[in-house]
Image: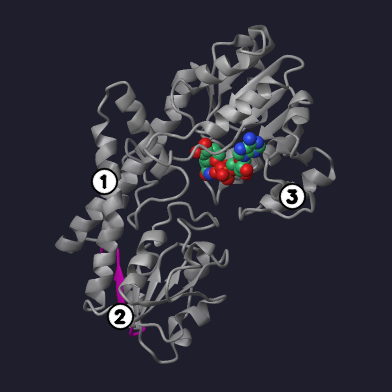
Amino acid sequence: MKLCMIGTGYVGLVSGVCFSDLGNDVICVDKDINKINLLKKGKIPIYEPGLSELVIKNYKNKKLTFSSDLRTSVKNSDIIFICVGTPTKKNGSSADLSQVFNVAKEIASSINKFKIIITKSTVPVTTGDEIEKIISRKNNKNKFSVISNPEFLREGEAIRDFTFPDRIVIGTNDKKSSKILRNLYSPLISKGAQYVNTSRRAAELIKYASNAFLATKITFINEVANLCEKTDINVEDISIGMGLDKRIGSRFLRAGPAYGGSCFPKDTKAIISTGDKYKINLSVIKSVIKSNENRSKILLDKVYTILNKKIRNRNITFLGVTFKANTDDMRDSPSLKMIPALSKKGAIIKYFDPTGYKKEFGKTKNVTYENSIKKSVEGSDLVIIHTEWNDFKSINYKNLSKGKKFIIYDMRNIYSPAKIKAQGFKYFSVGR
Ligand SMILES: NC(=O)c1ccc[n+]([C@@H]2O[C@H](COP(=O)([O-])OP(=O)(O)OC[C@H]3O[C@@H](n4cnc5c(N)ncnc54)[C@H](O)[C@@H]3O)[C@@H](O)[C@H]2O)c1
């Protein structure tokens, strides 16, 4: 099939390249010409494990092409996926749908034969109705079908998640288009993915409800971890004991810093805003947001306690600054709250991240990027494990520290407390 992905970010690029790898002809479109030029040279603008090899392979065999010409790309395709961003509005908490509607207007001017138009972007309930209205201003309704097909991939595991999804959700009442999509996804369905065909509005809400639920799970265990710290209980035992109950499940039940990233913070806010629009009080999700916003403060307070409230001129190292491992995404990373707060109190901060320098800290006082773990921990008073990269899991601190016994605050519980303490380091972790 001939597919067009509009928006070549984490979702558009990953799903586009995976569709091409399944044998479809895919054009990935972006208005960011630099991005398109990089991709044409085989360079990947984002960090995602395994993506580069797959892009190069499918670009070489011409199953995957890149373009900044949206209209021609739409004309040459049968199925159009809208994969642009839906960030939080600047003044408010609802989703800013301007990118989606701008794309819809451009599609409306490019329809030359029947098109299936799919929103893969995360969009609030009734956005599909709005897109349909925009496109029907210029086109007869029998020329197109607007479908919701939310994406559930996770950064860092995006290719695996796309290729082996738990479920594929298709929101449409149009039987003909549903059949075409079932066929498009048949290689994944035959490997075990559940195919859920529902109404367009339900598909839109499934995505938000799922993200809000996962954010709730993380926040829940983070609060339980606070209780564990006061009662001398290991939160890991609680996660195992709870997670073995099939009704609960073990995933997203690991205590740590606040949830961050490009989805949970904005999607929890957006679903509340949708609730408000229909006068429905989503009080559980509201309290999740509040608790999560307080999470960085709780972890910072612990840093102050660890350093006996003497922060000025103390050397603090952050290992990992992205919101989670295996991604370069800094959007709403908890480090964006913690590092500036410590800098404001006079700390001297060095950080190392496997995905390199971060412009986000370019203007923060006394914050330096180091290009190795070794350099970043040199002379440190406190080393904070902020992100659970494998690179940090087997560090030999004894060799690195040159005799200096810095303190380690492991916000991801990646080490065994007994082993680290046996090496002579003061060690703190989360909920244990
Ligand atoms: N990142 C994730 O892990 C993830 C997972 C599931 C769903 N989602 C959802 O998918 C959507 C996209 O997320 P993302 O992280 O891929 O965003 P992104 O910011 O990485 O990429 C969006 C891309 O769209 C491009 N764009 C914007 N307007 C355009 C236009 N008019 N024409 C062509 N290109 C245009 C931008 O230049 C950008 O490259 C969001 O709604 C998000 O909530 C994201």
Q: What stretch is highlighted in magenta?
A: 423-432
Left or right: 276, with 29 as reference point: left
Residue 161, labelled with which disc? none
SS assignment at label 3 = helix
Taking the image as drawn, is residue 330 in sight? yes
Amino acid at dot 2: Arg
Q: Main secondary structure of the magenta part?
A: loop
Label 2 C-beta lies within 8 Å of the nearest ligand 1 atom: no
* Quadrant housing residue 278: top left
* Quadrant housing residue 365: bottom left
Q: Residue at x 30, y 47 (%)?
A: 219
Taking the image as drawn, is residue 241 in sight? no
Q: Residue at x 61, y 53 (%)?
A: 48
Percent position (x, y) of residue 2? 76, 27
**Magenta span contains residue 211:** no
Q: Name above or below for residue 375 compared with residue 204.
A: below
Other-residue count near label 1 (Cα within 10 Å), few / some / many at <14 / 14–19 / ≥20: few
Q: Pointers 2 and 1 in contact (CB under 8 A)?
A: no
Other-residue count near label 3 (Cα within 10 Å), few / some / many at <14 / 14–19 / ≥20: many
From the image, tell me which residue sits under label 2. 312
Label 1 C-beta lies within 8 Å of the nearest ligand 1 atom: no
Other-residue count near label 2 (Cα within 10 Å), few / some / many at <14 / 14–19 / ≥20: few
Q: Name above or below for residue 200 compared with residue 151.
A: above
* Mark with earlier residue (2, 1): 1
Left or right: 146, with 424 as reference point: right
Q: In which quarter of the image is ligand 1?
A: top right
Q: Which of marks 2 and 1 is in front?
A: 2
From the image, tell me which residue sits under label 1. 290
Q: Which of marks 3 and 2 is in front?
A: 2
List the single residue furthest toward the left: 231
